[in-house]
Image: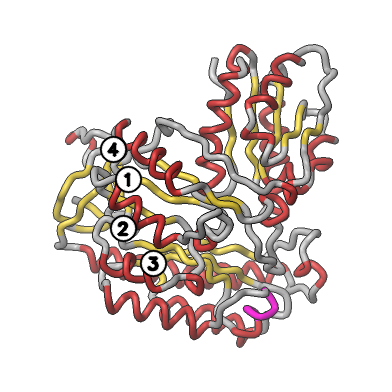
Amino acid sequence: MATEIVNFGCRLNSYEAEIIRQKASQAGLDEHEVIIFNSCAVTKEALRQAKQSIRKAARNNSKAKIIVTGCGAQTNPELFSTMPEVSFVLGNAEKLEVASYNAIAADFGLQKYEKIRVNDIMEVQEHAPHLIDSVEGKARAFVQIQNGCDHRCTFCIIPFGRGPSRSVPIGAVVRQIEQLCTAGYKEIVLTGVDLTSYGADLPIKSDLGILIQNILQLVPQLPRLRLSSIDSIEVNDLLFELLAFEPRLMPHLHLSLQAGDNLILKRMKRRHLREDAIAFCTKLKEKRPEIIFGADLIAGFPTETEEMFNNSLALIKECGLTYLHIFPFSAHEQVPASKMPQIAKAKIKARAAKLRAAGEQALQLHLASKVGKIENILVESNQKGRGEDYSPVKLPAELNYIPGSIVQKTIIAHDKSSLLI
């Protein structure tokens, strides 16, 4: 039996789930009934959902040993260790080490192994590359190039779950991508906690633009390279030029914007103004008209007035945002924003709904604009795919496309959520 992994949160967790699967299998955990929860700590709600899922899994399979790891386990180990359903708690560094799973495998039935194995993530100074040659059930592969964050946004617990920013050397990233291309992957997504901080900690200073330039030059067989979330204020000239003119770098960016009001951005300790975000999107759209922007936006940050909220709402049109991740503010008790004057939950919920409605309207306009155009579609399954700008595409099942292949088709319509061919 294979170890079951329940994943929460970001794309980085999705990538690390494959490393966890690999390490757990090497340690022989597949011979036991084990469920590993790779948790998220971005909000209180994320922690609540993890606990709820753990209890449900224990009810459905009382014989299974439950291991909890991820950012929730790193920042709140006692929260999970006190749950009777949980056998072991691993930190974010420990979850990537085969030694952790070897110790757990040796302890089955003995209960001598310490329940909590979570060390100080802030002491971790290097990020060892982890090579995987496949990603289970996926048409695209994620490659982790960076971990941790040196910034201290007032709403964010993630630096304390991930530790300081540390980068994977260029050579190791290139080798991983070459390996995945050999395995048949045609699209690679570069992922990390703070992508645009890449390279500053390496012995020979580098940056994200230099890394991308090396990947494209050294792996010519890779047709599609994509970035996960980036911080637009940290985009330098080289990275901008690549985003604007490199056809193998996909025309879709997910931006860490969080708000569209300058005072709220200041209280969040963000490093950009709303004018910076608008100027970046406008300039890049002028250079590459087909590029599409997604963004993270927080609804109901402490002290947010109606006028401040309307500035965030207006940012959707002013930046031309299409794919939105809306987060109703839910303060983690360990972050500074939890001590600020809070907004009523009903008001937060209503504001989040308005942001989602505006995002849905923007998506409809975008999908309509694609009708009649030819798209290069990465097949995710025999019924689903994604265009170069990450537009979802529904594929006729009877055509039986091969997952992972790229097909060129004309868009004939959309059904409000996906393009149709």
Q: Earlier in the sequence, mark 1 or mark 3?
A: 1
Amino acid on which disc 2 is placed: Met
Residue carrying label 4: 404
Q: Earlier in the sequence, mark 4 or mark 2?
A: 2
Residue carrying label 1: 187
Marks 1/3: CA–CA distance: 19 Å
Amino acid on which disc 4 is placed: Gly
Q: Is residue 311 magenta?
A: no
Q: Quadrant of residue 398?
A: top left
Marks 4/2: CA–CA distance: 16 Å
| Closer to the camera in the image, 345 or 299 | 299
| Closer to the camera in the image, 254 or 133 | 133
Q: Position of residue 410 (x, y in %)?
A: 14, 55
Which residue is located at x 63 percent, y 38 percent?
Answer: 38
Residue carrying label 2: 250
Marks 2/1: CA–CA distance: 9 Å
**Residue 239, numbered circle:** 3
Marks 2/3: CA–CA distance: 13 Å
Which residue is located at x 50 percent, y 63 percent?
Answer: 196
Q: Is residue 265 magenta?
A: yes
